[in-house]
Image (spheres, rainbow, N blue to C red):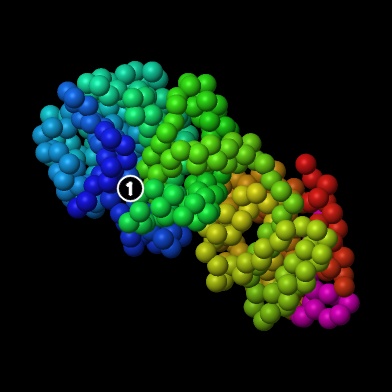
Amino acid sequence: MRAAKVTDNIWWVGAIDWNLRDFHGFETPQGTTYNCYLVMGDTGIALVDTTKAPFVSELLSRIESVVPLEKITHIVVNHVEPDHNGGLPEVMAAMPQARVVASPAGVKGVAEYHNGLEVEAVKAGDVIDLGGRTLTFQPMSMVHWPDSMFTYCPEERVLMPNDAFGQHVSSDERFASEYGLDAAFHELGVYYANILLPLGTAIDKAITKVVETGWELDVVAPSHGLIWRGEEIGRVIESYQRWGVGEKRDKIVIAYSTMWGSTAALASRIADAVGAAGCEVVVYDLAVSPIAHVTAELLEAKALLLGSPTLHHGMLYRVAGYLQYLAGLKPTGRLAATFGSYGWSKGAEKQMRARLEEIGFEMPFDDFTVKYRPGDDDFSSVAEWATGIAEAVKDKQ
Ligand code: FEO
């Protein structure tokens, strides 16, 4: 297995999960990577992060393409979620001489996950001297779990922030600039929306902390996807700053599911009207769209318009499933409204409204429903309804 040089003294030695298509419910059509890094000093070598258990042999093979396993003096556990920590016991067994460190919450997490496995705690500002290269640490609670930690190598000006700044992309390229910056930044947003959206306060604090520490950054090397270098880093950090404080634009996401086409026809007319009123708009049929991508569209949007016909007195299950997915991500600070059709009995709109309000959407608009299928008057009415929502979106700060 080939390793890749990140800087003169840091190597990427992670694993590529080409065929991962679901990351705890988040569709990952491009797979992912579990990035691990070797930091090479004159007197010590640290392995920063390990992999999901099935990928340990790939990791060990890549390490051995750079140095024998017995040369590793330290293992840094930045995060205990199983995609990084699942393979830790096997990695430790392969390099028993290595001292293993984690944040204080990480020490507890490793022990709890791995039946009492013991590792050592490092706290903010602690330094490990590898001889000519050092590592320093900053626990970053809730970026992504309570144990999350950033590791920084000042001599190489490389930050290894684990989940932060990652993307679920599998590629033979290691650097965002090689993969294509537009695609890499798109995936940065998809990942943020589906993994970090409910953690905006922690993200905002983390970015402030990175700025306050004065760490100079030539490279930001996350634990998933592509590595950021040079001027890309400012744009990455600025994106996280904006998302962390919930900055949005005049954009509306229309998501629906349909039975016989009436709700789909309403969605199309609504899109036309909000576009004509000056809002950016995207439309997704939840029956055929990856929900991770619908959610990514919501990241900078001010409103969600959700449509479903009534079936058995309620909403279609794909709409209910999407609402359950959204509930965990807590996309607050946004407007929402519901639309749909029914035969002889309503019900979907009531269920959608209740769930959207519970999630935290603001819902000052009436629900829009039509019986059987929309006629010309209904299309005029829904356009008027949608135009009112677009005006509210433009007025919303
Ligand atoms: Fe990539 Fe929170 O694990």
Amino acid at dot 1: Tyr
Direction from residue 279 to residue 151 in the image, left or right: left
- Residue holding disc 1: 34
* In-front residue for pair 95/276: 276
* x then y, percent, for residue 367: 79, 62
* x then y, percent, for residue 50: 27, 41
Q: Is residue 144 visible from the viewing direction of this image?
A: no
* x then y, percent, for residue 131: 22, 21
Q: Is 368 above or below relative to 77? A: below
Q: Is 284 above or below relative to 10? A: below
* In-front residue for pair 338/152: 152
Q: Is residue 152 magenta?
A: no
| Tally of marks | 1
* x then y, percent, for residue 134: 29, 23
Is the shortest distance between ligand 1 and the CB of mark 1 under 8 Å?
Answer: yes
- Residue under the image location 59 percent in, 60 percent down: 294
Secondary structure found at label 1: strand
- Residue under the image location 66 percent in, 66 percent down: 283
Direction from residue 215 to residue 396 in the image, left or right: right
Quadrant of the rendering where the C terminus is positioned: top right
Magenta residues, start to end: 365-379
Direction from residue 369 to residue 304 in the image, left or right: left
- Residue under the image location 42 percent in, 37 percent down: 220
